Image: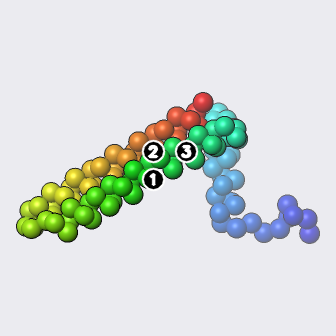
Amino acid sequence: MSEDDAPKSAYELAMERLRKRDRDQGIEERPLSEEQRARIADVRRVLDAKLAEREILYQSDRRRARTPDELEKLEEDYKRDRERLVSEREAKVEKIRAE
């Protein structure tokens, strides 16, 4: 039995269907260059550091909060900042991939 005839996992089958759908829609699959990979890694490293910094500040502020209202406001601010940073990271990565 050759490697091509071996049973495929659900993951492999799903990836084949996605690749076929992309081909049918005219979406071109391009591998990333080493420069793109390095830039993506750098973007992720920087924004992950910002996320970690924001988490530390949030935990610190949380310990100092005195009322439930303060805690609620801190949590809302933290969630908003976290979503913004994650969105920024993903947008930058997608921009690099599209180049």
Q: What residue is drawn where x is 69% and y is 53%?
A: 16
Between the C-alphas of marks 3 and 1, the distance is 10 Å
Determine the CA span between mark 1 and mark 2.
8 Å
**Residue ID for mark 2:** 89
Q: Is residue 82 left or right of residue 3?
A: left
Q: Secondary structure at mark 1?
A: helix
The CA span between labels 2 and 3 is: 10 Å
Q: Residue at x 68, y 46 (%)?
A: 20
The quadrant of the picture occupied by the C terminus is top right
Residue 58, given in percent of the width and then of the height, sits at 26, 60
Q: Which image quadrant for residue 55?
A: bottom left
Quadrant of the rendered structure where residue 60 is?
bottom left
Name the amino acid, label 1. Answer: Asp
- Front-most of residues 44 and 76: 44
Mark count: 3
Element carrying mark 2: helix
User: Which amino acid type is marked by label 2?
Assistant: Arg
**Residue 48, which numbered label?**
1
Between marks 2 and 3 in the image, the one whose residue lies nearer the viewer:
3
Is residue 58 something one can see in this rendering? yes
Q: Secondary structure at mark 3?
A: helix
| 1 and 2 marks in contact (CB < 8 Å) | yes
